[in-house]
Amino acid sequence: MSLESRTRKPKIPTSIVLFTGAYLLPAIAAAVWTQNGEFVFYCAVMLIQAVLVVVTHRRSGFSPRVLWGLSLWGLAHMVGGLVPVPESWPINGSIRVVYSWWIIPDRLKYDQVVHAFGFYVTAFVCWQGLTAIVCDLHPARHWQPTFGSLLLCVAASTGFGALNEVIEFVATLLVPKTNVGGYVNTGWDLVSNLAGAIAAAFWIRLAWKPPTPNQNPTNI
């Protein structure tokens, strides 16, 4: 990787910024308008996360696929909490939003799919961040996805998943009525996070190829 490519500060593509703003701003407005305190809180958290992604991207240079994955994860989260479902759709609990929807009754919830997808993407974020650090320390080294490095990424991704559960717990303390769920729901969230992270690790290993001299090694 050339010195210029390592020192240039990457920016979030305009298309991703516009796409994210196109759903996030209306979601904030809808949460405020409907006095949905839980999602006002989540929107604030998402804005903080967006700032962290921008800052980290300038250091690590995430691939466009990962940036799009993060944006789509945000969209799935907003849809899950703010879009109502028809009366005929099976749900878990009493709040009729997409997050409560049983895609397969008593087997698979929309919430679990979003968790798996989100921490699948997060594992890629961890891998690309780790790769950027190693490439800075050893520019001539072809860093490859070993079992140890992928295990570290899975652990980091599931650690972020646990942090997500802490944020949901804080929401239950701040907002009188939420759709967070109980202990079993939290357990399945963590299982979904782990499944997504492991799937990402397998994909990283299978898709990895030695980078060419001018290629960003984080672009998987």
Image (cartoon, rainbow, N blue to C red):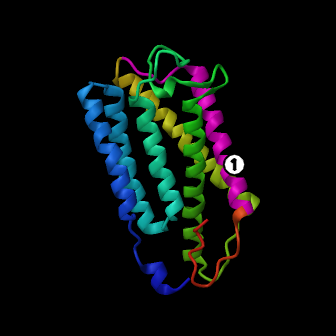
* Residue 117 is one of the magenta-drawn residues: no
Q: What amino acid type should be assigned to the residue bearing mark 1?
A: Ala
Q: Is residue 182 above or below residue 165?
A: above
Q: Is residue 38 above or below residue 6?
A: above
* Residue 184 is one of the magenta-drawn residues: yes
Where are the magenta residues, as a range? 177-206
Q: In the picture, residue 77 is in which quadrant?
A: top left
Q: Is residue 45 above or below residue 32?
A: below
Q: Is residue 26 above or below residue 124?
A: above
Residue at horizontal 40%, vertical 29%? 83
Is residue 186 left or right of 194 when viewed as pictured? Answer: left
Closer-to-camera residue (91/179): 91
Closer-to-camera residue (143/107): 107
Closer-to-camera residue (141/75): 75
User: Where residue 110 sits: x, y (%)?
Assistant: 56, 31
Where is mark 1, residue-wise? 199
